[in-house]
Every structure is written in C-alpha cells, then in structure tokens.
Image: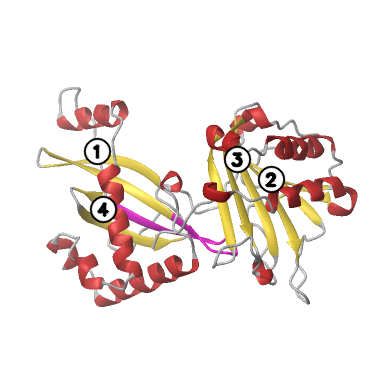
C-alpha cells in the first residue's frame, strides 16, 4: 500500500548474520508478545484531536522533522477525511483495532513501533481506516484511507470454489460480529446514527444468549436450496438508505477455517422508490468473493429468524461510541 500522508517509516531489515542487530530484531519480533496499551491510548488521543479539529495539538505529537516535511494541504486533507470518518461512524472497540509491531534499526539503535488501524464503519457499512504509527508517545505515521496496514488493495485472484452445501455450526464460531443499519427507518433499534453492532469471541457470543437463534439460522442455510452462485468481491452499491442486517463469523471447522470470514447479508426493508439489486435474496459469502444467493420467498423461516436476531435487545453488550 502506498501511504502518501505523513508516512515516515519505511522499514527494511536485512539479515546479515545471526549475531547482528537486524537478526536480533527479527527474532525479537517473532518471540515477543508486545503490550500495546500505551500505544493504543496515544493513537486514541491523536484521533480525538482530529475529531475535535485541534490541528496544533495533533502536530505536537509528531517529531519536528516529520512536521517540517508535511505541507498544509496534507494536514488539511488528513483532518477533513478523518473528521468525516469519525462523525459518520461509531468509534471502534479495542477488539476491532488491528495492531502489529515492527522494529527499526538505524545506526545500530533499535526503536520499536506499533502500527494501529482503526476501522470506522458508517451506517451504509462503508469503512474508512485511520492508520497510525506510534512509538514512545509520539506519532511517526498517519493516514486515512480505505484499507488497514498490510492489506492488499487489489481483488484477490484466487477464488475458493463453491460448496454444494454448507456445514456451519454454532460451536465452531471463533469470532462474530452483528451489524445492523436502520437506514431510512431510524427506529429504536439503531442508535443516534441509525445502527448498532455487537461483536467478540465465542465467550462473548455465549453471554448474549442467541445460540438457539443462530443454530437454527445455520441449520436453515445448511439445508436450503442454493439458487445462484458467483464470485463477487464487493457488495453492490446501495441504491437507497435500506434497513439491513450483516453477520460476520470466523469459524474453526473445516473447510471454513481456511476460507476467512463467513458472511450473511440481508436487506430487511428497502427505502420506498429505491429498490436494491439483491433485496429478493439472502446473500451468503466466504473467502471474500465466493457468493451464494438464496431466494427469500423460498426461505421464509430463515427470514423470520434473521429478523428475530436483528430485533433482539443486546443491552450492555452493544458497542458504545467514543468521541
């Protein structure tokens, strides 16, 4: 990925011998479980300055040599894009922030950096990432864009083949995310921005007590007739401000443990006069682009259970905003 915004650090670590600092740095990266609590707080502080339009405070977090290389237009672009992402979205919970560490060796001096990607997803399920590089309470990189650190921008060439039938089960869930957008309805289920989210690991999933609902949803998908299949990396552009439910899972059972996320998307209600392309179908996907379509008219029980899951009161388990 090419970061044009204040990306100062480009790491190139070369292995020369087992006793040199570069090799030691790589071994440290492989064998160290980094604690990034302070780096997370530093990054949140920076995002807070962006959201509050405090450019001088944000600049003060960078070394002078980085500030000197950034033009006013770069700062302005960062602030505008960052404020738009923050104002339209919910602040992501810590569990959703992607964090990695890297070590830079310069003149035999070692410095450890944390790279943090914060996903800001709006009510149309469009995500912008605020990507930050930090070390020692200072910032060394900042970017606002469509992708987190390390993600390929191009569509993956490889496509996992379609299955003839699914074999998904509740006990194989390792991680989940429920995302609801109230769209034009602006009802009591969405927050002030019109949506809610619940996510976490299997322990969190058990706490919200939806095993009977999810198990039946999975059983219905496993037994349903697949009406259409294709390969599609991106979801269709939404025509209106429809109400929808979007489910994501990481599974431990084969073959899904090799497929990445398992997704279910369903348009609950279209905005009047603005039909959605796949509103007559329940969409299931794995491996980023391997897609299956199920006619909602032939799967009314599945529609019923998706609505039951959608309109459940998740109480304190719903993710809260941070601004």
User: For the magenta stretch, what is the residue range?
Assistant: 119-133
| SS at mark 2 in the image | strand
Is tag 2's residue or tag 1's residue first in the polypeptide sequence? 1
Q: Is residue 14 magenta?
A: no
Indicate which label's residue lies in the foreground, 2 or 1. 2
Q: Mark 1 points at which residue?
A: 13
- Which residue, given by chain and number where applicable, does mark 4 sit on? 42
Q: Residue at x 21, y 68 (%)?
A: 57
Left or right: residue 307 versus residue 5 is: right
Q: How far apart are marks 4 and 2 (CA)?
A: 36 Å
Q: Which mark is residue 309?
A: none
Residue 198 appears at what percent x and percent y?
56, 48
Residue at the farthest right position: 298
* Quarter holding residue 126: bottom right
The residue carrying mark 2 is 285
Mark 1 vs mark 3, foreground winner is 3
Q: In which quarter of the image is the C terminus?
A: bottom left
Q: Compared with residue 197, is residue 286 higher up or lower down, i.e. above or below?
A: above
Residue that mark 3 sits on = 208
Front: mark 3 or 2: 3
Closest to the observer, 232 or 214: 214
Mark nearer the N terminus (4 vs 2): 4
CA gap, disc 3 to disc 2? 24 Å
């Amino acid at each position: 990925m090419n970061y044009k915004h204040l990306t100062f650090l480009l790491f190139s670590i070369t292995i020369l011998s087992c006793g040199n600092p570069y090799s030691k740095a790589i071994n440290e990266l492989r064998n160290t479980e980094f604690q990034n609590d302070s780096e997370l707080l530093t990054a949140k502080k920076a995002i807070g300055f962006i959201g509050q339009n405090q450019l001088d405070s944000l600049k003060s977090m960078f070394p002078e040599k980085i500030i000197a290389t950034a033009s006013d237009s770069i700062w302005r672009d960062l602030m505008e894009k960052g404020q738009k992402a923050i104002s339209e979205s919910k602040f992501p919970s810590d569990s959703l922030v992607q964090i990695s560490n890297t070590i830079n060796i310069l003149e035999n001096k070692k410095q450890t950096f944390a790279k943090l990607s914060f996903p800001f997803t709006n009510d149309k399920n469009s995500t912008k990432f605020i990507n930050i590089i930090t070390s020692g309470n200072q910032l060394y990189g900042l970017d606002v864009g469509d992708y987190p650190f390390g993600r390929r921008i191009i569509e993956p060439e490889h496509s996992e083949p379609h299955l003839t039938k699914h074999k998904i089960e509740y006990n194989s869930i390792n991680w989940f995310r429920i995302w609801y957008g109230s769209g034009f309805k602006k009802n009591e289920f969405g927050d002030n921005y019109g949506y809610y989210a619940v996510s976490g690991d299997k322990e969190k999933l058990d706490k919200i007590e939806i095993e009977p609902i999810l198990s039946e949803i999975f059983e219905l998908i496993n037994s349903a007739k697949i009406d259409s299949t294709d390969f599609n990396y991106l979801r269709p552009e939404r025509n209106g401000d429809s109400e929808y439910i979007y489910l994501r899972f990481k599974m431990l059972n084969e073959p899904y443990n090799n497929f990445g996320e398992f997704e279910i998307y369903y348009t609950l209600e279209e905005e009047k006069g603005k039909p959605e392309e796949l509103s007559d179908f329940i969409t299931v996907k794995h491996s980023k682009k391997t897609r299956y379509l199920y006619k909602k008219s032939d799967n009314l029980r599945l529609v019923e259970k998706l609505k039951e899951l959608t309109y459940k009161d998740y109480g304190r388990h719903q993710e809260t905003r941070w601004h």
